């Protein structure tokens, strides 16, 4: 947990605010100022708050001037943004690291970078802007907030330091919706006693900054500005849609589509003005909420510099940072690689092709077959369909698919299959712990361990499809972490960019990468997508992943606890075959015939809308994967809609 104190400029009061916070909460905060010039601010902090815990600066200089100038005068080199980010101390458990910056956010850091280039690497931190409450405070604050958020970081609070200015306070509240705006009095003297007295009197106000770290606290999306169409216009739009648009998984003669005009937090706004809870996170993509401010800011900041560039022989820092971040989540030694693509299905295609080429390079081209599992679903392109083989979705396309073996999720059956065919099998492909589109079927970590052990016994590659299960959906960053196993290739997409834009990645283990390393034409992986590693998508995904690593456990845990308590009573109800919950995934399977074609969808949609919830069941399976920002009230609406569906169908 990190709280970053920004100033509108030098002498804005950053050290004063830090010292007040440390005096008020010495047991909860530790202090670090990475770059210091002149009289060290850390020495001042310790003098004013003797109990304060301060980490040493990464670089300190004698001249009280800008760090880049001070370093130049002393013939030294300043650390760059990435080096400073790597040096950020890890506070003791339960404590918050208070980071004091220098100058303003756009002050020069090195000859080629600004301080904001370091700050944007702290995506999981809470940012606070401080300025004196004298004339001009409003303009200084708004300029600073706009500058910071145009580069990605999201400002959570503003502190006006000095005598309260009601005009400045109310104006900032109006122009910075969702942020905390505080007025804090400065101590009368720069002495330990004065700071202790001032901190004690204002402890409740200062506590607001620490509350930024309470579970569930987040900035809401800026309220959507929507001009709702009238009934006639709504009808015209639906008619135009029916004339020209082909919707996925939908009959051309099916029901009229619902028009969505806006998204906000866990809600979708329909054209008729209804706000409905997006219970399935827009096909499992929305993590933090619709139009999450931090992700929107990351996209806008990147667009100020680059829109798109092809990725063959070129690179950019957004892709590099995202790849480093993703590989850092894997229990592999160094040497892995990330291959970017567009969506989950293409990520699986990449994995399948890499697995086969791996064996070709090793001189075993006969290992061209794959193993999928009953209930698995990996996408709608030909390779992904081949390792799924679902008769409802893919039956028409069987002549187009390559050979694959589909077996139950049973180690003994898998072992028998591989015993007979291992010399022809390239890889097994499976969704760890949760088979998503197959009906949110959940299986145990022990079963996953045994399946992987069988594949290892026969020297068969393991491909994990974590398109649904990744990014803390199951309570761990990757679902396979529950089983303490590692794949050879891993596919991720859907929520990778928090639902803001499409991006996918195939993570490749170092031992697979090594096979391709020789400088021979046959070792080139001839695969690519026009929008591979799109800069905006990579930037948003990086901001998203950093948020997930910081917030995932607490956010998902809250939702899981609600579902377990609230939906458990549905077990045993007439018409309910099973209730399954893992992480923020909840599924209620109904006892209805017909599999995916069970006639429950329109009933579920109608009942859900009556309760203010948008549902889309998987055949007889009602399920929810809501955004993490969801309120208890909206969670209750989802549970109520599930109960009402059961009652409508079986009572």
Image (tube, grey):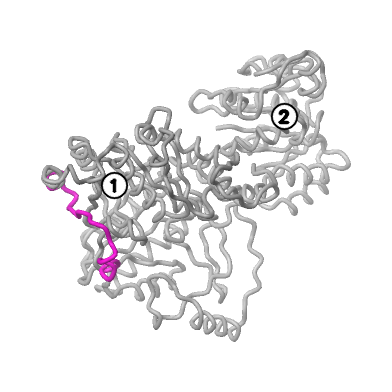
Residue 297 placement, left or right of 190: left
Q: Quadrant of residue 125?
A: top right
Residue at 58% of width from left, 41% of height from top?
A: 315
Where's residue 555, x and y in %?
46, 45
Instruction: Find numbered disc 1 in the image and state the secondary structure of the residue it sits on.
Output: loop
Q: Quadrant of the N terminus?
A: top right
Query: Mark 1 sits on what residue?
Result: 433
Q: Which residues are magenta?
A: 392-413
Q: Which mark is residue 101?
A: none
Where's residue 402, x and y in %?
26, 58
Q: Residue furthest bottom?
A: 232
Instruction: Find numbered disc 2 in the image and state the secondary structure of the residue it sits on.
Output: helix
The foreground one among 374 and 647 is 374
The foreground one among 99 and 116 is 116
Query: Mark 2 sits on what residue?
Result: 17
Where's residue 600, x and y in %?
30, 73
Q: Quadrant of the C terminus?
A: bottom left
Question: Of discs 2 and 1, which sits in the foreground?
Answer: 1
């Amino acid at each position: 947990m990190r709280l970053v104190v920004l100033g509108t400029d030098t002498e804005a009061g950053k050290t004063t605010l830090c010292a007040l916070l440390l005096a008020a909460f010495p047991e909860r905060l530790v202090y670090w100022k990475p770059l210091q010039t002149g009289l060290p601010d850390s020495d001042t902090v310790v003098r004013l708050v003797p109990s304060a815990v301060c980490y040493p600066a990464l670089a300190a200089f004698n001249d009280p001037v800008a760090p880049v100038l001070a370093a130049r005068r002393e013939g030294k080199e300043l650390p760059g943004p990435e080096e400073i980010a790597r040096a950020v101390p890890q506070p003791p458990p339960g404590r918050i690291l208070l980071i004091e910056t220098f100058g303003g956010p756009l002050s020069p850091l090195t000859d080629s970078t600004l301080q904001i280039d370091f700050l944007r690497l702290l995506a999981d931190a809470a940012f606070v802007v401080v300025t004196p409450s004298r004339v001009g405070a409003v303009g200084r604050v708004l300029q600073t907030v706009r500058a910071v958020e145009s580069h990605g970081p999201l400002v959570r609070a503003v502190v006006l330091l000095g005598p309260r200015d009601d005009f400045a306070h109310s104006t900032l509240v109006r122009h910075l919706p969702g942020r905390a705006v505080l007025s804090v009095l400065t101590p009368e003297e720069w002495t330990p006693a004065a700071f202790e007295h001032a901190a004690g009197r204002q402890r409740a106000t200062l506590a607001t900054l620490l509350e930024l770290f309470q579970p569930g606290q987040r900035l809401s999306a800026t309220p959507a500005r929507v001009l709702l169409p009238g009934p006639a216009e709504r009808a015209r739009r639906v008619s135009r849609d029916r004339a020209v648009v082909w919707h996925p998984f939908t009959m051309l003669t099916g029901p009229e589509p619902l028009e969505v005009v806006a998204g906000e937090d866990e809600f979708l706004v329909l054209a008729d003005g209804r706000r409905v809870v997006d219970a399935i996170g827009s096909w499992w993509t929305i993590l933090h909420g619709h139009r999450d401010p931090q992700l929107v800011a990351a996209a806008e900041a990147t667009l100020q510099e680059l829109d798109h560039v092809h990725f063959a022989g070129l690179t950019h820092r957004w892709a590099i940072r995202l790849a480093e971040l993703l590989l850092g989540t894997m229990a592999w030694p160094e040497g892995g690689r990330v291959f970017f693509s567009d969506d989950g299905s293409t990520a699986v295609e990449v994995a399948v092709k890499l697995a086969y080429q791996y064996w070709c390079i090793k001189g075993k081209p006969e290992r061209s077959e794959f193993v999928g599992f009953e209930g698995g679903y990996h996408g709608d392109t030909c390779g992904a369909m081949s390792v799924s083989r679902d008769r409802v979705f893919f039956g028409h396309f069987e002549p187009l698919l390559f050979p694959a073996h589909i077996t139950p999720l049973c180690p003994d059956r898998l072992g028998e299959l591989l015993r007979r065919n291992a010399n022809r099998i390239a890889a097994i492909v499976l969704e760890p712990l949760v088979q998503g589109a197959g009906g949110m079927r959940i299986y145990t970590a022990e079963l996953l361990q045994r399946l992987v052990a069988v594949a290892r016994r026969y020297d068969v590659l393991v491909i994990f499809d974590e398109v649904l299960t990744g990014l803390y959906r199951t309570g761990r960053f990757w679902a396979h972490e529950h089983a303490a196993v590692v794949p050879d290739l891993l596919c991720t997409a859907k929520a990778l960019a928090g639902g803001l834009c499409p991006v996918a990645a195939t993570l490749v283990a170092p031992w697979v990468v090594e096979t391709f390393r020789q400088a021979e034409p046959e070792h080139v992986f001839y695969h690519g997508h026009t929008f591979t590693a799109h800069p905006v998508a990579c930037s948003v995904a990086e901001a998203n992943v950093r948020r997930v690593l910081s917030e995932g456990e607490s956010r998902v845990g809250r939702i899981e606890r609600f579902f377990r308590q609230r939906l458990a009573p549905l077990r045993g109800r007439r018409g309910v075959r099973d209730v399954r919950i893992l992480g923020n995934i909840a599924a209620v399977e109904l006892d209805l015939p017909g599999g995916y074609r069970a006639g429950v969808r329109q009933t579920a949609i109608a009942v859900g809308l009556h309760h203010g919830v948008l549902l889309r069941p998987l055949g007889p399976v009602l399920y929810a994967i809501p955004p993490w920002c969801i309120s208890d009230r909206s969670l209750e609406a989802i549970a109520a809609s599930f109960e009402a569906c059961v009652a409508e169908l079986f009572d």
